[in-house]
Amino acid sequence: MRKSLFVVIVLIVFASFAAAQVPTSGNVFFGYSYFNTNVPGANRINTNGWEASFEGKIVPFLGMVADFDSHYGTANFPAVDCPGVGCPLPPSSANVSAHNFLFGPRVSVPAGKFRPFGEFLIGAGHINAGAAGSDTSFATAIGGGLDYRIVRPVAWRFQGDYIHTNLFGTGENNVRLSTGIVFRF
C-alpha cells in the first residue's frame, strides 16, 4: 500500500512538471549534509553525506524542487538481556545509509545579495541498517534556507529541513542541515 501511494505521488509530481512551462530559470545545488536520524533499537545517530537539488522557476518567486540526499554513519545497539541460549546479546554496531527523494514547491524572495526561501516537500525516505534491516516510507519535509550570491551565477546555500518519516513502523522526526554551492541559470 505504501509503495503504491508513493508511485501515485511521484506520478502526480512528474505530471505537474510536464504540464508546467519548461522553466527558463532556476538553480542547481550540491553540498555537504548532516542528518540526525533514528534506527529502531539504537540511539539517535548522526550521519554525514551529500544533498543535491534542482529548482525550476514557474514564476519569479515560486519554483518546483527535486531534492535528493544520501547520508552514512554507524548505529550502536546496546547489549540485550534476554532469556535463552546465547543471551545476553553483546553490544553491536551496524553501518547505516539513509536516503531521501523529495519533490515540491519552494517560495523565495531576492533581497540584494541574499535570497531567503521556504519549502514543503513530499516523497520517500529509505534506510538500510545492515542486520537491523531496511525500510522505505512516505516522507515529508518542511524547511528553508538562505542563498548568498558570490557572483551573478554562483551562490552559497545554508539550509535546514525538518523531515518526517515512518520507517520500521515508527514515526521519526529528523533534522537535516546542508551547505554548499548553488549554480543559477
Image (cartoon, helix red, strand yellow):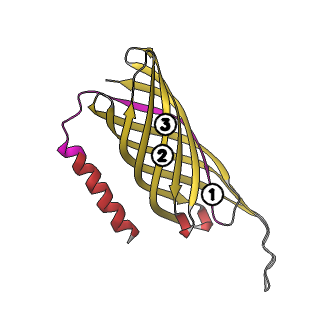
In this figure, what is the number of numbered marks?
Answer: 3
Q: Amino acid at mark 1?
A: Asn
159 versus 10 height, above or below? above
Image spot of residue 70 (x, y percent): 51, 46
Tell whether 96 sits left or right of 121.
right
Sooner in the amino-acid sequence: mark 1 or mark 3? 1
Tell me the quarter of the picture where residue 115 sits.
Answer: top left
The residue wearing badge 2 is: 142
Q: Quadrant of the C terminus?
A: top left
The residue wearing badge 1 is: 38
Is mark 1 in CB contact (under 8 Å) with mark 3? no
Residue, x 36% and y 61% (percent of image)? 6
Residue, x 43% and y 32% (percent of image)? 29
Q: Nearer the viewer, residue 166 or 99?
A: 166
Tell me the quarter of the picture where residue 80 sits.
Answer: bottom right
How far is disc 1 from disc 2 in space, using C-alphas? 18 Å
Residue, x 36% and y 36% (percent of image)? 54
98 versus 66 height, above or below? below
Q: Quadrant of the N terminus?
A: bottom left
Sooner in the amino-acid sequence: mark 1 or mark 2? 1
Q: Which mark is residue 144?
A: 3
How far is disc 2 from disc 3 in space, using C-alphas? 7 Å
Image spot of residue 157 (x, y percent): 49, 28
